Image (cartoon, rainbow, N blue to C red):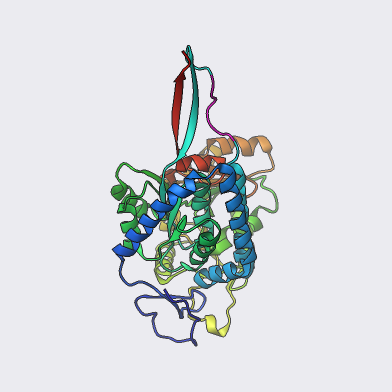
Amino acid sequence: MTIFHSPAPTQEKTPVGIAADPRTGNPRIDLPVEADEQRVTTAVRAARNASARWSALTTGERSQRLLRFADAVERRADQYVAAERAGTGKPLAEASGEVEQCVDLIRFYAGAIRTDQSPGSGHRLPGRESWVRWEPLGVVAAIVPWNYPLLMAVWRFAPALAAGNAVVVKPAETTPDSMLLAAEDAAEVLGPDVLVTVPGGRDTGRLLVESPVDVVAFTGSKGGGLDVLARAGLRRVSLELGGNCPAIVLPDAPDYTYERLVGASIYNAGQSCAAPARVITLRGNYEEVVERLGEAMRSKRAGADFGPLNNPDQLARYDRIVDASVAGVRHVGEVLLNDDEAGGYWRPGLILADLPDDAPAVMDETFGPALTVQAVEHEDDAVDLANGVSHALAASVWSTSAAGGLGIARRLDAGEVWVNCHLEQTAELPHGGRKQSGHGTDLSVLAISEYQRPKTITVNLA
């Protein structure tokens, strides 16, 4: 794979087999045109051989190597940031913050694996002594998306490596850059083939799922997740499949609600599974909520406050959903671009109100910088509407009443719920979906068990 700088701006379409810089639309990186079965087979075989060496290390030894791996990423942070920006167009502050999160996560799991999380051992049967060993599964296939190329990979490979597995990562076709760097650093610090990167498109991912790996961790679309399940058979699968997340704004919401909701909705150009997408409020408060959200959104500038959509397919999908959603009220942000960014995949922030309840922007995850606003009569109706779509990943409630906010938070069907904030995560807190948002746990010490299996050992003391 060859990485090269973007040429001068051109109006020609990006050639087949070439990924574009989303900021300009210009070609930037060669891509494999066809899936290479031999390349996948070789990577999995190498990881299988490495897993025996890696799992044989004590938890302390693995911890020390993971800490050195985090140090290596931190030393080359500027290169990782540049790689993230090349593939995603993220603003510098976003990319820098995400690389810092990656370093922190690797260090977190380096420490977490040294804690004892097994069920209590001891005298459980007459005349016997029992204990539980938590053993690695072997080789983990991690298929990660383009919206957070390095961060989503670290969410998967950090706990898997800490647990003693070797990992083969298939990054998204358009954003392999940062994982290629990570594989270089891992080979030097962790050992050869403990963390392997296999670039490629969907067919490469399918080959990887069908190869002799022990568990598949997939982050992506519902359709992709169903395809993984069909190909994985009886092997363990962890899925994170999207959001379309509600935000319930009550009449006593704090003054900062609107600015922070809009800020969360445009972070990474709205290309976050847990981003707020559907604002739900009471009818008597509706016009004020729409106007205040609109005021906040009109001040946001694509090209300055947030980046572009990632690729032409995502741009077309977003436009199709927004265009099919007839809104009586639209508040539109600004687009502020340099001359060479005119061909990029930019869209302004949007507030869409006075929509039918079955509008595509309400029912589907737009995965872009848009917020819909809906009105209901009562708080119970707000909860029903929030829970009324097929996704159930995350949600938020906005209220100055602790009892009211927490009461609604308990009733929301989502794996993660925020009160008076949104899209705030840390290594210590678990994240995972329900319903068609998938299953499995990312982040926290709970994620380690996604990549381990227990073995109970009982000894007859007589």
Q: Quadrant of the N terminus?
A: bottom left
Q: Position of residue 326 (x, y in %)?
A: 43, 62
Q: Position of residue 266 (x, y in %)?
A: 57, 62
417 in the magenta segment = no
On screen, residue 45 versus residue 305, left or right, reads left
Q: Is residue 333 visible?
A: no
Looking at the image, the residue that sits furthest to the front is: 462
Q: Pick whichever, 303 or 380, lies toward us.
A: 303
Could you tell me how many numbered marks the image carries? 0
Q: Pick whichever, 148 or 34, lies toward us.
A: 34
Q: Residue at x 49, y 51 (%)?
A: 156
Magenta-highlighted residues:
116-122
On screen, residue 31 versus residue 344, left or right, reads left
Q: Pick whichever, 123 or 387, lies toward us.
A: 123
Query: Main SS type for the magenta part?
Result: loop
120 in the magenta segment = yes
Q: Pick whichever, 121 or 275, lies toward us.
A: 121
Residue 304's image quarter?
A: bottom right
Decide: is 339 above or below 319. Answer: below
Q: Residue at x 47, y 51 (%)?
A: 243
Q: Position of residue 457 (x, y in %)?
A: 45, 26
Q: Position of residue 50 (x, y in %)?
A: 44, 53
On screen, residue 333 versus residue 273, left or right, reads right
Decide: is 302 above or below 171. Answer: below
Q: Residue at x 53, y 17 (%)?
A: 123
Q: Is residue 194 visible?
A: yes
